[in-house]
């Protein structure tokens, strides 16, 4: 019987779900689902000082919003839980005790000052890769009032090798590790120690994570060897970079960093899911739009990129626009209404469906609808128009005002009226529509002008043009 594929996303609850974390979770999810396995959320909450009360909830909510809902989590556990590390301390202690009993680990009472002095001496001797000098191993003295850390005794003659699913063969000599800490003085396990214990006991088969963890993998493989456990397969993803090809950091203001921010800006989860799936991975096709089901079907671990992935904002907005255009009217209303001010919703209630459909094709972010609908709730402001209307264009607008009073405001009637006026004034295309658009909306661009005028209705269209013609701005 084949082993069930089990992947995991294991964040610390020290902040909101970040782009990099979301992409890591996504690749773990896609592989698990492609292999008909399980995707697990484990919360690594052992850094008590930095944990945020809402951190775990934000991570889970972000995953659920993206459509990456875990099969197993701290809220929905199986027999291998708990999935909060803070509830597994007795488990870690069991394995710490085993290592201490076998003399494979030891207590270290060295103070921060002693460690700094040791490092200083090593550097003075020209040693660049500073390591712990094993003072407490060779001279074990219990110091009262000091809670010791537990260090692993690392033999220096081993080669730690794995075949990375992204980078191929990677080798780290154990001599580069030093006797690293596995239990902190507050009784909490370190990342590398807890990681190994949890991944083994939770039956994790594959780990997709960022390339910053490559150095950790050497330490973890050493622990797997000590316990005689089979390690999972590893895939270390390339970094995400900004437009300057600099690694994305949480302080980078050129990119929206957190998943909940994309929800607030009006990105559809399907769009963000699609976009993130192509950051560091590519399908065997030129297509760029994929449903979740299709991505699960075609996901192939052999198609990870070995080069950094650039975060392309225009591409994300293009992707979001694609998904917005696919929404049914009912879904469009559900999506956009929360972005519109209440007073505007009251004003627009009779034409809301038409107005949302009018703007649907141009929206890149849902939040854009907030200001776009204001062409129907407030009168245009022509003061900032740089365009200078000529006499022919003013007469065009005057004639439209006169002739429009004689027709019923349907799309067809308005279209025919504009065509007739175009013939009369020898104007067509942009030369015909541009002055009319500026007069009606005060804007250079916008949705269908005919549809906009039709939604205005005869009375409001008349008031707008009368106000425009009284405004001296067009005589500049």
Image: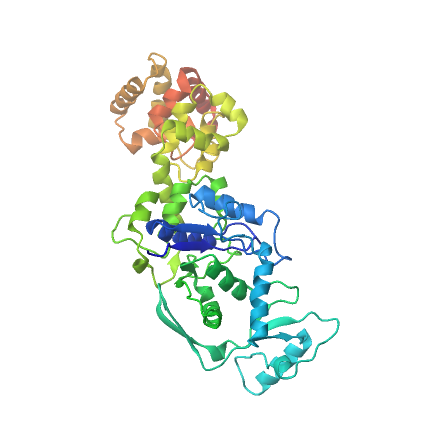
Quarter occupied by residue 123: bottom right
Q: Report whether 179 appears left or right of 203.
A: right
Residue 335 x/y as whole percent? 44, 33
Q: Nearer the viewer, residue 474 or 448?
A: 448
Q: Residue at x 34, y 23 (%)?
A: 396
Q: Is residue 476 above or below residue 156?
A: above
Is 75 left, or right, of 311 in this rendering? right
At 35% from the left edge and 20% from the top edge, which residue is drawn?
400
Quarter holding residue 105:
bottom right
Query: Residue 313 appears at what percent x and percent y?
Result: 40, 49
Q: Residue furthest bottom?
A: 125
Residue 184 horizontal side relative to residue 415, left or right: right
Q: Position of residue 148 (x, y in %)?
A: 66, 71
Q: Is residue 454 above or below residue 11?
A: above
Q: Quadrant of the C terminus?
A: top left
Q: Quadrant of residue 284?
A: bottom left
């Amino acid at each position: 019987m084949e082993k069930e594929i089990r992947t995991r996303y294991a964040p610390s609850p020290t902040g909101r779900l970040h782009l990099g974390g979301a992409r890591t979770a996504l690749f773990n999810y896609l592989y698990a689902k492609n292999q008909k396995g399980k995707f697990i959320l484990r919360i690594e909450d052992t850094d008590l000082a930095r944990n945020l009360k809402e951190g775990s909830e934000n991570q889970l909510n972000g995953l659920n919003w993206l459509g990456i809902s875990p099969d197993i989590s701290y809220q929905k556990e199986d027999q291998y839980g708990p999935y909060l590390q803070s509830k597994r301390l007795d488990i870690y202690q069991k394995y710490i005790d085993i290592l201490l009993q076998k003399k494979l680990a030891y207590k270290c009472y060295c103070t921060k000052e002693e460690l700094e002095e040791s490092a200083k001496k090593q550097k003075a001797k020209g040693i660049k890769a500073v390591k712990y000098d094993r003072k407490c191993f060779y001279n074990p003295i219990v110091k009262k009032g000091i809670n010791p850390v537990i260090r692993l005794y690392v033999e220096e003659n081993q080669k730690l090798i794995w075949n990375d699913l992204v980078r191929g063969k990677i080798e780290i000599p154990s001599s580069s590790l030093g006797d690293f800490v596995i239990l902190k003085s507050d009784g909490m396990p370190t990342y590398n120690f807890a990681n190994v214990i949890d991944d083994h006991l939770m039956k994790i088969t594959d780990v997709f994570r960022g390339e910053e963890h490559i150095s950790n993998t050497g330490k973890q493989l050493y622990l797997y060897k000590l316990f005689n456990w089979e390690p999972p397969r590893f895939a270390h993803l390339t970094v995400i970079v900004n437009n300057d090809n600099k690694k994305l950091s949480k302080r980078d203001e050129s990119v929206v960093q957190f998943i909940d921010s994309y929800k607030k800006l009006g990105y559809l989860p399907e769009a963000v899911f699609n976009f993130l799936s192509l950051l560091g991975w590519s399908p065997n096709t030129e297509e760029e739009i994929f449903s979740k089901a299709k991505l699960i079907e075609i996901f192939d671990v052999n198609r990870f990129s070995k080069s950094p992935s650039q975060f392309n904002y225009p591409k994300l907005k293009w992707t979001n626009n694609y998904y917005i255009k696919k929404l049914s009217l009912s879904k469009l209303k559900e999506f956009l209404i929360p972005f519109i001010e209440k007073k505007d919703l009251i004003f627009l209630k009779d034409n809301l469906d038409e107005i949302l459909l009018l703007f649907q094709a141009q929206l890149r972010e849902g939040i854009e609808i907030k200001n776009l609908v204001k062409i129907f709730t407030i009168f245009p402001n022509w003061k900032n128009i740089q365009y200078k209307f000529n006499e022919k264009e003013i007469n065009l607008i005057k004639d439209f005002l006169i002739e429009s009073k004689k027709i019923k405001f349907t799309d067809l009637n308005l279209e025919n009226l504009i065509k007739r006026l175009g013939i009369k004034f020898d104007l067509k295309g942009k030369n015909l529509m541009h002055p009319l658009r500026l007069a009606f909306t005060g804007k250079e661009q916008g949705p269908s002008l005919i549809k906009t005028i039709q939604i205005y209705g005869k009375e409001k269209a008349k008031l707008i043009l009368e106000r425009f013609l009284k405004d001296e701005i067009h005589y500049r």
